[in-house]
Image (tube, helix red, strand yellow):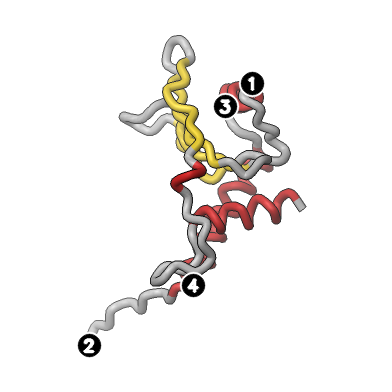
Amino acid sequence: MEKREPRQSNVQQQNAHAERSLRAEASYWRRHGVPPILARLGAERGIQWDRSIVIELGVDFPGMPSIFGELVTQDHRFMAFEIDTTGEVRVEQWEDVTSVQNFNEHNRGIGVGRGALALRVLRELNA
């Protein structure tokens, strides 16, 4: 019997998967709340957690800061963050990375950009 390669997803399927992943991550952190130190530091920087979403969050990964990831603010700004909580709390990165996001709805070969998908999820969860 001949072994067949798994079929690769088409662009629409890949976009749907990426959007589901972003929605699942954002929904999880909306339901459960972000780690308290991130909640506090974000609030100090103007983040309205009930109108913002976390699209990536890593906690206690070996070789990485204690908390790191990316969020989309209530003002549609993309913020990358790294926070070290070992010893004294240090914000190693809190950077607006909106300018490097792909907001294009029609990219050749990849379809909808990640930035556009994240904004869709933000609008949906804030509706």
In the rendered structure, which amino acid carries the disc numbered 1?
Glu
Cβ atoms under marks 3 and 4 closer than 8 Å: no
Residue 101 x %, y %: 47, 49
Q: Residue furthest bottom?
A: 1
Q: Earlier in the sequence, mark 2 or mark 4?
A: 2
Q: Earlier in the sequence, mark 4 or mark 1?
A: 4
Residue for badge 1: 44
Residue 46 x %, y %: 66, 27
Residue for badge 2: 2
Cβ atoms under marks 1 and 2 closer than 8 Å: no
Residue shown at the point (66%, 41%) measured from the top left: 75
Residue shown at the point (47%, 37%) measured from the top left: 69
Which of labels 1 and 2 is toward the front?
1
Residue for badge 3: 38
In the rendered structure, which amino acid carries the disc numbered 3?
Leu
Label 1 to label 2, Cα distance in Å?
A: 60 Å
In the rendered structure, which amino acid carries the disc numbered 2?
Glu
Q: Is label 3 in a helix, a strand or a loop? A: helix
**The disc label shown at residue 13, or none:** 4
Q: Residue furthest right?
A: 127
Report whether 77 appears left or right of 74: left
Label 4 to label 1, Cα distance in Å?
A: 39 Å
Which of labels 3 and 2 is toward the front?
3
